[in-house]
Amino acid sequence: MERLGFIGMGNMAQALALGFIRSGSIAKTAVFAYAPHQDKLKKNAASIGFTPLGSLTELAETCDTLVMACKPYQIEGVVQELGDLLEGKALLSIAAGWDFARYQSVLPQGTRVQFIMPNTPAMVAEGVLLFEETNSLTEEEHADAVRLFASVGLVQELPSSLMGIGGTVTGCGPAFVDLFLEAYGDAAVKYGMKRSDAYRLISQMVLGSAKLQRETGLHPGVLKDNVCSPAGTTIRGVAALERDGFRSACIRSIDAIMEK
């Protein structure tokens, strides 16, 4: 890709643009964006380094690759406004719910599209970027997109049928982890620790535990057992969590989303 254009510049788009530029995956002079709130767009441009443009038309005429980063309900209007200007473009969409099949009903012929589901940890280059396996990018465009998004986290391709559960676990999951952090922070404060210290220590504990599992590939149950000594403190805590239905509550949180 020669020039990358963001349609919309909300929090996720800002995180991606900043990550792409900081990593050196794309030069800041090759990144452009349009958003209706021009004052805010120009402020973000000055901070992140991309070039703000004044209209959707100008963006489409300037860039060969577009990132659909507006609200999902705005997409049909954007496509209608751009019309034939989308022909021959590569469209990388991060809008929830807009998979490859859905785009086929609205995009002009000749527009190549890839559905991607990022999550908020991409803001610190530790995201999960889910790529739908079904796409119409060229081989070179797909490789460029994977390389670009890998600069802000882990890229994983999934079949269309698994994008829903994949996006639920990785997209909603950060909120559940934040609840976990807050709860254990409250417990630490209850026993006398400063809240700022508690959050710092617990966040590092979660980060380290996740990294240990990812890098060793060991089953989480094995790692849990490694910490649990016979008649020790940790196994008593594990028993309390089991008694209160911790694991079943985690599964039910996903059921509540998937069974809506």
Image: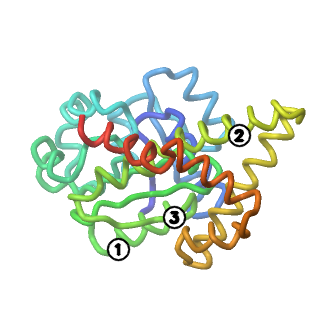
Name the mark on residue 154. 3
Which is nearer the eye, 31 or 100?
100
Alpha-carbon neighbours of circle 3 within 10 Å: few (<14), some, or many (≥20)? some
Where does the image place residue 187, in percent across and percent down from the top left? 75, 35
248 on left or right of 182:
left
Relative height, residue 68 to residue 75 (above, below): below
Gap in angstroms between the C-alphas marked 2 and 1:
46 Å
Check disc 2 and give the amino acid type.
Tyr
Gap in angstroms between the C-alphas marked 3 and 1:
19 Å
Residue behind mark 1:
140
The colour mode here is rainbow
Mark 2 touching mark 1, by CB under 8 A? no
231 on left or right of 79:
right
Where does the image place residue 201, in percent across and percent down from the top left? 81, 48
Residue behind mark 2:
184
Mark 3 or 1, closer to the camera:
3
Where does the image place residue 129, in percent across and percent down from the top left? 45, 57
Where does the image place residue 168, in percent across and percent down from the top left? 37, 47
Marks 3 and 2, the one that precedes in the sequence: 3
Marks 2 and 1, the one that precedes in the sequence: 1
The residue depicted at 72 percent of the width and 48 percent of the height is 203
